[in-house]
């Protein structure tokens, strides 16, 4: 009987000692209490048709979002750590359009910032004194009278001449260009020119499912070693075969020759369905990146996920260099979000 009592007393002593050793020090406990009201989590960025604009040490990310009332903006100093701004960069209350806010592009011109975008299947341009916005229009009107047009991209050449690249919804999604007036108020009459499509000089990858309404869209233009490169996406964005290719030209208005090695980015490249409709840009060190979207998963398209991949021009010994994407550098963008426990 004495042995049993002694055993009970021994267990009680050990239990009390263990309880004391597991207590949190008073200073750590106070820190825990300070942070108990909020927690930070990393969340996926869900922007389709994304674009990144670099200005004064900050990267600004915009794109098509399910909010359907304008454009969000995310910021980063290193392309890895992103933060979502609390306010929209562009709100439909202050510009043309009330639905279908798609495919924005932001650029700087004469100490002001401009956003070219699609709304109501028409192209518009808004202005701001800050890349965070708010982007506004004095007169809430579409930018051009080109009929149904989407996916604008504005390119300013070394000599200051300006060009609009866009997609006409005309017997398929077809890419066109036009020369812009110097004040960006509209296009110069008689300059609308066909760039490329999936009907004239088609490549097999551009219409993998043999759709009657073929798609070429999401143009992005850059100039390298005196040659103009037009990057674009083909196939319906809902298709797993949505992918990226490019064409080259001796002038910003063409004629455009499709790269025979297309596509340069597709589902086989990175193991994800539907990669495409992005934008090429340089980071602060001069490294090229392509920001783009992919499908949500193998079974679902939306919401589309935003990703980055490195690109470099490779000398080929031909007339022009070739763009190569580094498939190993591919990654999805995430942002840090603070969430209070009582939310």
Image: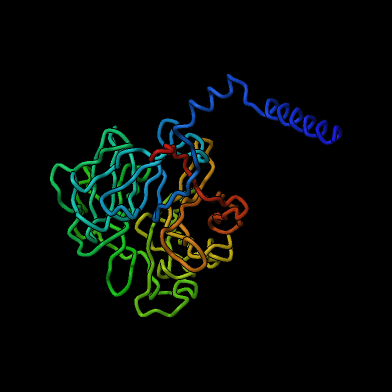
Residue 290: % across, % down: 49, 51
- Number of residue marks: 0
Is residue 245 visible in the rendered image? The answer is no
Compare residues 255 and 177 and report the one nearer the observer.
Answer: 177
Residue 260: % across, % down: 53, 68
Residue 272: % across, % down: 54, 62
In the image, taking residue 169 as reference, residue 290 lies left or right, namely right
Is residue 337 visible in the rendered image? The answer is yes
State the image quarter where residue 169 is shown: bottom left
Residue sitting at x 43%, y 80%: 210
Way the structure is coloured: rainbow
Compare residues 41 and 90 and report the one nearer the observer.
Answer: 41
Q: What is the quadrant of the C terminus in the image? A: top left
Q: Residue furthest front?
A: 1
Residue sitting at x 46%, y 66%: 300
Compare residues 39 and 120 and report the one nearer the observer.
Answer: 39
The answer to whether 273 is drawn above or below residue 19 in the figure is below
In the image, taking residue 62 as reference, residue 315 lies left or right, namely right
The answer to whether 148 is drawn above or below residue 138 in the figure is below
Residue sitting at x 14%, y 42%: 138
The answer to whether 90 is drawn above or below residue 233 in the figure is above
The answer to whether 258 is drawn above or below residue 283 in the figure is below
Residue sitting at x 32%, y 37%: 132
State the image quarter where residue 48 is shown: bottom left
Q: What is the quadrant of the N terminus in the image? A: top right
């Amino acid at each position: 009987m004495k042995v049993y009592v002694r055993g009970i007393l021994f267990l009680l002593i050990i239990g009390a000692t263990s309880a004391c050793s597991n207590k949190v020090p008073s200073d750590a406990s106070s820190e825990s209490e300070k942070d108990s009201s909020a927690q930070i989590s990393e969340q996926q960025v869900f922007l389709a048709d994304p674009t990144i604009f670099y200005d004064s040490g900050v990267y600004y990310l915009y794109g098509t979002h399910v909010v359907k009332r304008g454009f969000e903006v995310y910021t980063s100093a290193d392309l890895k750590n992103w933060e979502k701004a609390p306010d929209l960069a562009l709100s439909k209350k202050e510009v043309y359009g009330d639905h279908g806010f798609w495919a924005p592009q932001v650029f700087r011109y004469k100490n002001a910032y401009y956003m070219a975008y699609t709304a109501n299947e028409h192209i518009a341009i808004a202005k701001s004194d800050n890349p965070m916005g708010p982007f506004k229009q004095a007169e809430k009107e579409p930018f051009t009278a080109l009929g149904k047009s989407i996916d604008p991209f504005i390119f300013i050449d070394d000599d200051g001449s300006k060009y609009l690249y866009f997609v006409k919804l005309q017997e398929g999604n077809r890419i066109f260009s036009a020369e812009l007036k110097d004040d960006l108020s509209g296009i110069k009459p008689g300059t609308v020119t066909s760039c490329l499509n999936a009907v004239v000089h088609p490549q097999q990858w551009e219409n993998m499912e043999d759709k009657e309404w073929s798609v070429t869209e999401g143009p992005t233009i850059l100039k390298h070693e005196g040659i103009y490169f037009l990057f674009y996406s083909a196939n319906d964005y809902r298709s797993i075969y949505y992918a990226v290719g490019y064409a080259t030209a001796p002038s910003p208005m063409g004629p455009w020759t499709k790269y025979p090695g297309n596509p340069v980015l597709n589902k086989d490249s990175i193991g994800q369905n539907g990669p495409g409709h992005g934008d090429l840009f340089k980071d602060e060190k001069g490294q090229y990146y392509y920001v783009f979207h992919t499908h949500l998963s193998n079974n679902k398209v939306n919401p589309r996920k935003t990703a980055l991949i490195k690109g470099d021009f490779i000398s080929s010994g031909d007339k022009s260099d070739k763009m190569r994407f580094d498939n190993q550098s591919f990654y999805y963008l995430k942002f840090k979000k603070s969430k209070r426990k009582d939310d």
